[in-house]
Image: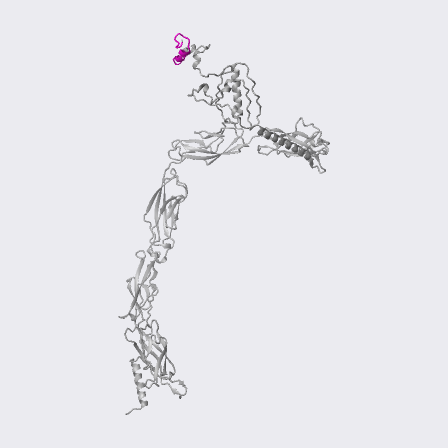
Amino acid sequence: MKLGKVEFCHFLQILALFLCLSGMNQAELSRSRSKPYFQSGKTRTKRSWVWNQFFVLEEYMGTDPLYVGKLHSDVDKGDGSIKYILSGEGASSIFIIDENTGDIHATKRLDREEQAYYTLRAQALDRLTNKPVEPESEFVIKIQDINDNEPKFLDGPYTAGVPEMSPVGTSVVQVTATDADDPTYGNSARVVYSILQGQPYFSVEPKTGVIKTALPNMDREAKDQYLLVIQAKDMVGQNGGLSGTTSVTVTLTDVNDNPPRFPRRSYQYNVPESLPVASVVARIKAADADVGPNAEMEYKIVDGDGLGVFKISVDKDTQEGIITIQKELDFEAKTSYTLRIEAANMNVDPRFLSLGPFSDMTTVKIIVEDVDEPPVFNSRLYSMVVSEAAKVGTIIGTVAAHDPDASNSPVRYSIDRNTDLERYFNIDANSGVITTAKSLDRETNAVHNITVLAMESQNPAQIGRGYVAITILDINDNAPEFAMEYETTVCENAQPGQVIQKISAIDKDDPPNGHQFYFSLTAEAANNHNFTLQDNKDNTATVLTRRNGFRRQEQSVFYLPIFIVDSGSPSLSSTNTLTIRVCDCDADGVAQTCNAEAYILPAGLSTGALIAILACVLTLLVLVLLIVTMRRRKKEPLIFDEERDIRENIVRYDDEGGGEEDTEAFDMAALRNLNIIRDTKTRRDVTPEIQFLSRPTFKSIPDNVIFREFIWERLKEADVDPCAPPYDSLQTYAFEGNGSVAESLSSLDSISSNSDQNYDYLSDWGPRFKRLADMYGTGPDCLYS
């Protein structure tokens, strides 16, 4: 049968549909109702089909472009008048189209995980007019998935914890792996889990990835950490599937499944008896394999003979039991103590009570060691009293101390002088009797607090201290006196019986019943006509006037002797003088002027004016004295003339001098002529209190008087010399007397002189003076006879 054109077209369409369904061209053809398309100058036509989507495999590794599908229009007669164009995602860059045939190819490797599909638009154009012959159609190219991604654990590696001793099947942690492949296409993204490392302790659910315990009674104390390796495999775990792994660190957390146990059943410690209260005696610890709150313990003393002497507490950081002292230890009283101590967990888990009691007991024995202790006083504080009238050597009291050690060494006593600086008290070194060493005065110090030292005779380094408070008892040894310095005045216009002063008294003594003073005027003042005294019987007295008409110009001051007696036994008394000034008072009785000199001032001249005049006169006198002093200093120089400077020096003992030719040290003219008038040299910088007169011309007087006057004159010159040193010095004077011409000061020629001096006595002075006796003697053996 011969087919027409229409039947042939239908045949081609059926063939194309078959090829698409068989996957040869990898295109899906679907019928749809054509939409109207209007083209200018042409009749209305109808589209036969459109392209919905194409499929292409990802990860194509070939060298040629990958064929995707074919576009064709009913208008295309195959004569080349129609051309196809492609636009949209990836057009020209990834996907290209043959404009003549409509074949679409992919030029690059596609990855579904990067982009799962591309939306493009296709259009058929008239080649000559370049006008569309079909409306633009949109289609999708889907990237078909292949298994090219392995599962990945995005949250790995994992850490988890599970309590020790947990039952089998206890959930630990869930792991999750993700696969980037398409979960809607095949089994590429279907993952199953398995455990590669960690059996037989743990297992994993294949589908959910939940890790569970697989063994019971896992003990943290045996092993507290496990490392698991979990695998995730796609393709439902079949061969050829891709896989990924992760690690899971599982830590067993602690539970209180171990009771405390003491390593030893008994302990023994030695402590000295001198250990202070609250000191640590020992530290004990019960072992507990648990940690944290499960290892917290409490200790208590449940039995023993040291319940009140020792106590135990817990160290929160180390969980040790700390044994401390509550009372002082005494080797002589008790040498050892035994304690029964219990340690128990504070947080007990009821699930593990079957493992045994969560407490333990131990015995602690404490041995007290003897130490050499200082002497101990029978009383920590001694209170003693003594009268301030006690004589030196009076016994005040006795202190006693003993050596608490078994040796009981003798004790010697002394007073710590830092507490008795004035040494008022002594103590007998052997008996401890305290006596007075000085007279006591309660008013100076009413209570003496002293420290008594007790030392062992065999070991003086051991010193005990006792404290003594000595109270001084008062006696009436102080007379009463005025309570203050009174300034009493009486007005000139005072009336008889007017009160001018109220007085009181004080007494340094402290009688047990308080003070009682009695006031009266002395016998010589009792009958005076000016003032009287009234005792108020309350330790005060009142001074009153007896008359009026007091006048300052007649008598400006009155002295009133007042006799005061205390109530002591025996009573003491004193006479105190009250000074009363007569004053001019105003109408209210307020004193205005109390000076009697105001009546003798010149008329019209006040006191202030007179003081101003006297001040001016004194100022003028001071100015005159200053001017005179300055003129004297200008006229007389301070330094002496060199011509009158007679120098003096100290001659060395080994220097015999240069004789009369040596004129450097002395003024030879002064030595040759003693009759010159020597002016008295005075210091110009100070005004001397005594002016020395110039020494008169020497007369013929005995030589010893001449020398005395000469030395005295030189001494006075040195005293007033401003250049002389301010310390004592040796003055050497080459002066031979009034009748000497000072031609020679040497004694070498004295052997030939007609001297009446007899030197025979030199021979009686012994061998040392024999040479001088031979030189100056007159005997027959004289060398120069």
Q: Is residue 450 left or right of residue 354?
A: right
Task: State the residue at coordinates (29%, 91%).
Answer: 3
Instruction: Tell me where residue 298 appears, x and y as whole percent.
Output: 38, 51
Over which residues does the magenta segment extend?
A: 765-784
Q: Quadrant of the N terminus?
A: bottom left
Q: Position of residue 612 (x, y in %)?
A: 67, 34
Residue 566 visible: no
Q: Of 350 and 275, which appears nearest the observer?
A: 275
Q: Position of residue 153 (x, y in %)?
A: 33, 66
Q: How is the image coloured?
A: one colour
Depth check: give the residue in front, 138 or 15: 138
Does 133 appear in magenta? no
Q: Nearer the viewer, residue 596 or 603?
A: 603
Quadrant of the rendered image containing residue 252: bottom left
Residue 482 in view in this figure: yes
Residue 380 placement (x, y as % from top left) = 46, 36
Identity of the residue furthest to the front in this view:
661
Q: Is residue 772 magenta?
A: yes
Residue situated furthest left in the rendering: 239
Using the image as rendered, state which of residue 409 and residue 461 is in the foreground: 461
Quarter of the rendering containing residue 155: bottom left
Res 779 quadrant in image: top left
Residue 727 falls left or right of residue 284: right
